[in-house]
Image (cartoon, rainbow, N blue to C red):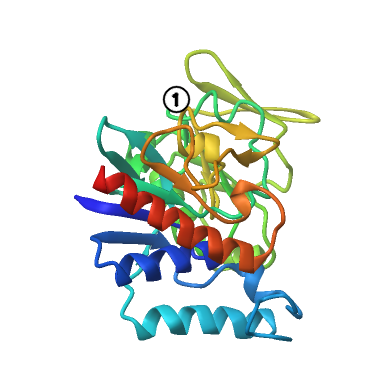
Amino acid sequence: MYDIAIIGSGPAGVSAAVNAKLLNKKYIWLASRATSKKVARAELIKNYVGLPDITGGELAWTLKNHADSMGVELTEAVVTGVYDLGGRFALLAGNETYEAKTVILCLGVETVKPIAGEEKFLGRGISYCATCDGFLYKGKTIAVLCFDKHFEHEVEYLCKLAGKAYVMPFYRGYEGFASKNPAENAEVILKTPTAFEGDTKVREVVFKDGKLPVDGVFILRGAVSPTTLVHGLKVEDGHIAVNRGCSTNIAGIFAAGDCTGRPYQYIKAAGEGNVALHSAVEFLGK
């Protein structure tokens, strides 16, 4: 059981993790090993106090180096669910489950909106985790929506299990993977779903020009929307609602960074990560 679970690898997540280490708390930091892509791709940053005219790549390296130099440990994982168990939280990441007394969400801004029906059928035919639920669809017909090259090994795993797999890639460079990993039961579809439909379970993937019957759908993204990640989380104007202490409407869950709203600035995210961590520590003390 951890005191604090921190989700996210941007400035807010790094700040929260560094301060958790400084305060000698039992924490787990769940994130991509690569620092936030948004940070790394920034051309020039002029308003990060103390680091004038720094590039995004340089800031990403600085954040990572700071954490590494302090021995801040990171567990590389994509968290797909946070569940309130009453006094503690369970975090599902791949086929692993972690428990913590408090959670800090440093999710950045969700750039991909959920597809119509995605939240409705989550856990009822729609899954975010190939290794968790893939075996349930052995020999069946599935759709696999892949949004990042990082998940190609999961696509391959699902294709081997399924009787028929409709693979829908939404990233550059998928052609190389498709040619190197031919599967008789796999079919690449270059169309974007508009909705998922069904009854008690998902039954169809809907496109503008028709429907595709399936037994299940796997959506492989690098992030999950806040309301899908945490049931009952209050959101306002697309952002997680927090107070000045970065507390959400769920006792024990805090949020920091771009996911809490504008301004979308790295210095603001780092500050909120610090505030959220101290609020979590105060919560633990009570």
Count of numbered tags: 1
Q: Is residue 213 above or below residue 188?
A: above
Tell me the crowding category of disc 1: few under 14, some 14 to 19, or many 20 or more residues within 10 angstroms, Cα based.
Answer: some
**Residue highlighted by disc 1:** 124
Across and down, in percent, residue 196 comes to: 62, 27
Across and down, in percent, residue 279 comes to: 40, 50
Can I make out residue 129 in this image?
no
Can I make out residue 91 in this image?
yes
Residue ranking furthest to the left: 1
Horizontal arrangement in the rendering, residue 51 relative to residue 97 (left or right): right
User: What residue do we see at 63% from left, 67% from top?
Assistant: 266
Horizontal arrangement in the rendering, residue 77 relative to residue 27 (left or right): right
Across and down, in percent, residue 182 comes to: 54, 60
Amino acid on which the number 1 mark rests in the picture? Arg
* Viewer-closest of 57 and 283: 283
Q: Is residue 21 above or below residue 223?
A: below
* Viewer-closest of 161 and 235: 235
Q: Quadrant of residue 115?
A: top right
Horizontal arrangement in the rendering, residue 14 relative to residue 4 (left or right): right
Q: Circle 1 sits in a helix, a strand or a loop, which is it?
A: loop
User: What residue do we see at 54% from left, 23% from top?
Assistant: 120
User: What residue do we see at 27% from left, 47% from top?
Assistant: 284
Across and down, in percent, residue 187 comes to: 60, 47
